[in-house]
């Protein structure tokens, strides 16, 4: 099924979905954060068809989210997150928080996140004001910036 392109839509969410909205893309990026780097690792973990994985990895490389890098011991390649990919970390963390809250596993929490240096739990992501207060949707107003005006 062919989906409508958001390429011409002047919206930050739509532009993000143009790149990340395909169902496998964020799972591939999630697995990169978990340390996977090779085609075979992604295929085994995700159970995704080789042709689909090839297309998804190529798109993430084309978008500058992953870098395809040769591995020293032969003709194999590995996929490494670029800074653009690393910048998706809060997005993945937010989605995991949302999933744990609204689509929980009956057996309990799937993953705990702790700070490497201290072993202490990581607090959930929140929208914070400049002075450190937590803000809800009712506290935030959208204001048009120069990129919104046509």
Image: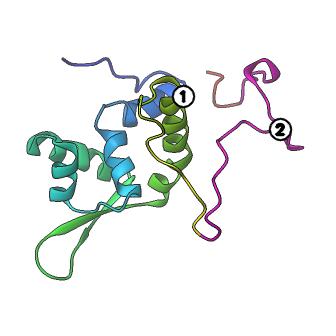
2 relative to 17, above or below: above
Q: Secondary structure at mark 1?
A: helix
Query: Mark 2 packing: few (<14 Cα in 10 Å), some, or many (20+)?
Result: few
**122 to 52, vertically: above or below:** below
Residue at image location 16% in from the left, 41% down from the top: 48
**Image side of residue 59 versus residue 95, left or right:** left
Tell me: 43 left or right of 122: left
Magenta run includes residue 73: no
Residue visible at 54% across and 53% down? 113
Q: Is residue 68 above or below residue 109?
A: below
Give the residue displayed 50% in from the left and 35% down from the top: 95
User: Is residue 125 at least partly visible in the picture?
Assistant: yes
> Which residue is at the far bottom?
73
Q: Nearer the viewer, residue 25 or 97?
A: 97
Observer-nearest residue: 113 or 147? 113
Find the magenta span and give its range: 117-145
In the picture of the structure, the residue carrying the numbered disc 1 is 101
């Amino acid at each position: 099924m062919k989906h409508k392109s958001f390429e011409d839509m002047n919206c930050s969410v739509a532009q993000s979905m143009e790149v990340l909205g395909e169902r496998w893309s964020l799972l591939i990026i999630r697995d990169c954060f978990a340390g996977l780097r090779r085609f075979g690792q992604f295929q085994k973990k995700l159970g995704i068809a080789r042709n689909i994985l090839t297309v998804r990895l190529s798109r993430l490389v084309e978008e500058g989210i992953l870098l395809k890098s040769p591995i020293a011991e032969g003709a194999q390649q590995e996929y490494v997150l670029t800074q653009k990919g690393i910048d998706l970390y809060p997005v993945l963390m937010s989605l995991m928080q949302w999933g744990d809250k609204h689509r929980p596993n009956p057996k309990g929490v799937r993953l705990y996140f702790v700070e490497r240096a201290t072993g202490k739990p990581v607090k959930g992501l929140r929208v914070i004001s400049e002075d450190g207060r937590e803000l809800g949707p009712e506290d935030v107003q959208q204001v048009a910036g120069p990129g919104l005006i046509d």
